[in-house]
């Protein structure tokens, strides 16, 4: 078994340590707050529980970057020795490759000119020992972390960890060299854990521990709680006596030893508690945004990869929030703790002075840590807004716009006064354009208002109301006139056919909420229709009135001249708008028909067929002449085939005729009679032999 000890070299210079360590504060990665640290209180030193296993074997607590930052901070004022021995922060060495072993289960890949920080980080990972433990051991053994100038000499690097340097003999040259020392010490700590029964100090039992290599100084019985503490005693087999503890970093009496005392002192001062690490974090931003403040940052507990809580106190009243937002930047400094440690919270606050304090909550119920306290004053901002429109019609007034107050995310009130009478409305309608123009205030800040008013002049004022009782913002104050708007419209077409008169156009009244009436007069007879047909062309030309303002009208009329007049009717009873008066001529359509049969029968002559006049859907007369003698009949028999051939005239246009005649030849002619008195239409003339 390799014997190591730490009584003399572990207290390489208690006197030098006094000046360097009492006010030590941990240097941390850029952009993070310092780890919680203060002068160690040795009254809390527990000889049976010097450091927890979780902290001792956590290799992930520092990256090479954060180790280098720590060494740079501790060695900020370091000057190299005259003989060229460098400060630890500047030390470099070429390392050799070490294969994975039972103790160091990760291989170490050697490289040329590696920095001390890189060596410490790589050894910590390969052997599963905290780099903080290795840094503290370097300090307690040779004081290399804080050494400077004449205090630097090669032997301190040669036996940097005090490994292979027993109290009773010279150091073993097998383990010379900085890299060799760091790797061997880390490997030995793992060996203690793998084979605890092979060593004199064991966890979970009472152990007799000397105060000093001088056995005359006596010993005490200590119950060692855990393996990490047992490993420290196997590495440095002495406990500090009362004089050593009372001296802090200083010198006790002749029976004092300092190795494990200094380990606990340095670790506590530099990295926080040894048995329950305190949470750390950063408040990156405390900024006013509409409605309150935004508090953003990160917080984590080195004892767990799980997200922890942060408590944010505003004016003494606290809210608990989880620090679980992704923060990928943290993986560079805390590679084993994950990235879900960010927080970004909105706190609703009104104007005035406020205190915002953020705490990181310990995962094991230990002391919570204040991250940052900020005092800020939120001004009372005046409301902002705009009146987009104020229109009048015979119906009254309509107005609309937007308004918000940066001191609240809630919609604010708008007061509208009409002739001195007040109306309170809420600006809560969706206005995405406002949300885009004023990021952070949200979209729901639009308002609209309408009121029916008599014709005439009216005084209209509108104000955006301050959410906190401050001065209102005047949006408008003006006199408007409510007047009757005349209808608008156009008669697009008037046409005639044998079916009658057809006309179409459009009309609307800006005072109306919907379509208006159109009156059509034909030869003095009036007909009321509604202008409600779709006319997108009208909607495009007159924005805001809508599309449904078209009209169409048709009426059968007899052939001849007819007077047609069209009027758009005012929605409020005002004068109608004349769209046009026209005289049109309806044509007279000649009758149509066909003689389907003309034959001799037993009794005489029979004629059958159909006849109609497109000027009317009613049956018309048919005249049948036999040898010059006429007989009128009506074409009113059902003929669905005719109805299908001439849609709109109906089916009842068939006729049948019979007449007794003497034996001989007879001349038969059939005429369809015009319904309007025009010329009859000859359908057929033929001789029939009976």
Image: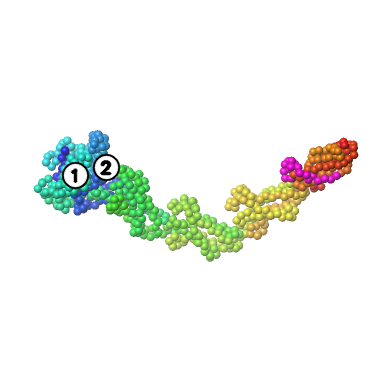
Q: Is residue 77 left or right of residue 583?
A: left
Q: CA distance from mark 1 to mark 2?
A: 23 Å
Pointer 2 local density, CA inside 10 Å: few below 14, some 14–19, many at least 20:
many
Residue 442, placed above or below residue 59: below
Under circle 2, the secondary element is helix
Pointer 1 local density, CA inside 10 Å: few below 14, some 14–19, many at least 20:
many
Q: Quadrant of the N terminus?
A: top left
Which residue is farthest left?
Answer: 216
Chain-order first, disc 1 or disc 2? 2
The spot of residue 417 in percent (x, y) is 52, 63
Between 497 and 592, the one lying in front of the other is 592
Residue 111 occupies quadrant: top left
Residue 114 occupies quadrant: top left
Which residue is tagged 1?
A: 202
Under circle 1, the secondary element is loop
Between 105 and 583, the one lying in front of the other is 105
* Residue at 42% over, 56% down: 291
From where the camera sits, is residue 335 visible? yes
The spot of residue 596 in percent (x, y) is 79, 38
The spot of residue 339 in percent (x, y) is 34, 45
Q: Is residue 237 left or right of residue 584?
A: left
Colour scheme shown: rainbow
Which residue is tagged 2?
A: 59
From where the camera sits, is residue 264 visible? no
């Amino acid at each position: 078994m390799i014997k190591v000890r730490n009584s003399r070299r572990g207290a390489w210079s208690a006197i030098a340590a006094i000046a360097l360590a009492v006010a030590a504060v941990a240097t941390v990665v850029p952009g993070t707050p310092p780890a919680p640290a203060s002068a160690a209180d040795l009254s809390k030193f527990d000889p049976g529980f010097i450091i927890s296993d979780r902290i001792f074997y956590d290799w992930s607590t520092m990256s090479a970057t954060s180790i280098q930052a720590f060494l740079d901070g501790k060695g900020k004022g370091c000057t190299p020795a005259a003989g060229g021995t460098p400060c630890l922060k500047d030390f470099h060495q070429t390392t050799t490759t070490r294969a994975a072993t039972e103790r160091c289960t990760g291989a170490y890949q050697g490289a040329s000119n590696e920095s001390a920080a890189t060596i410490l980080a790589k050894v910590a990972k390969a052997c599963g020992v905290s780099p903080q433990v290795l840094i503290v051991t370097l300090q307690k053994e040779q004081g290399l972390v804080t050494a400077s100038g004449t205090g630097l000499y090669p032997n301190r690097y040669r036996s940097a960890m005090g490994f292979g340097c027993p109290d009773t003999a010279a150091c073993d040259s097998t383990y010379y060299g900085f890299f060799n020392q760091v790797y061997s010490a880390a490997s030995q700590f793992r060996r203690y854990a793998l084979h605890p029964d092979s060593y004199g100090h064991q966890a979970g039992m009472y152990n007799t521990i000397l105060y000093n290599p001088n056995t005359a100084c006596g010993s005490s019985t200590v119950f060692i709680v855990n393996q990490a503490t047992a490993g420290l005693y196997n590495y440095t087999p002495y406990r500090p006596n009362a004089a050593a503890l009372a001296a802090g970093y200083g010198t006790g009496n002749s029976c004092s030893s300092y190795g494990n005392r200094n380990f606990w002192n340095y670790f506590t001062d530099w990295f926080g508690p040894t048995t329950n690490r305190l949470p750390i974090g950063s408040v990156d931003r405390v900024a006013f945004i509409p409605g309150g403040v935004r508090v953003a940052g990160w917080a984590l507990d080195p004892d767990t990869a799980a997200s922890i809580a942060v408590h944010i106190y505003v004016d003494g009243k606290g809210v608990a929030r989880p620090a679980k937002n992704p923060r990928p930047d943290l993986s560079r400094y805390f590679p084993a703790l994950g990235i879900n440690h960010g927080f970004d919270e909105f706190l609703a606050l009104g104007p005035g002075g406020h205190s915002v304090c953020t705490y990181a909550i310990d995962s094991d119920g230990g002391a919570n840590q204040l991250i940052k306290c900020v005092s800020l004053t939120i001004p009372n901002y005046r409301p902002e807004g705009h009146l987009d429109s104020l229109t009048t019609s015979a119906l009254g007034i309509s107005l609309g716009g937007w308004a918000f107050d940066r001191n609240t995310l809630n919609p604010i009130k708008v007061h509208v006064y009409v002739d001195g009478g007040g109306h309170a409305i809420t600006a809560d309608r969706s206005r995405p354009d406002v949300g885009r123009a004023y990021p952070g205030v949200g979209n729901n800040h639009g308002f609209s208002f309408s009121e029916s008013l008599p014709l005439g002049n009216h005084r209209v004022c509108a104000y955006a109301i301050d959410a906190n009782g401050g001065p209102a913002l005047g949006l408008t104050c003006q006199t408007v006139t409510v007047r009757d708007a005349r209808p608008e419209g156009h008669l697009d077409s008037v046409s005639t056919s044998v079916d009658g008169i057809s006309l179409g156009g459009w009309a609307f009244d800006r005072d109306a909420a919907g379509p208006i009436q159109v009156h059509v007069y034909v030869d003095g007879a009036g007909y009321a229709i509604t202008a409600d047909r779709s006319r997108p062309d009208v909607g495009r030309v007159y924005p805001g009135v809508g599309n449904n303002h078209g009209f169409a009208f048709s009426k059968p009329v007899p052939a001849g001249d007819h007077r047609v007049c069209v009027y758009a009717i005012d929605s409020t009873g005002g004068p109608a708008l004349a769209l046009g008066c026209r005289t049109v001529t309806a044509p007279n359509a000649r009758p149509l028909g066909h003689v389907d049969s003309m034959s001799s029968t037993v009794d005489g002559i029979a004629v059958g067929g159909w006849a109609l006049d497109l000027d009317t859907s009613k049956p018309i007369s048919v005249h049948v002449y036999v040898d010059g003698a006429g007989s009128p009949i009506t074409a009113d028999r059902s003929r669905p085939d005719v109805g299908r051939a001439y849609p709109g005239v109906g089916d009842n246009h068939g006729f049948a005729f019979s007449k007794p005649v003497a034996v001989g030849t007879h001349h038969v002619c059939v005429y369809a009679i015009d319904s309007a008195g025009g010329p009859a239409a000859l359908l057929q003339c033929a001789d029939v032999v009976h």
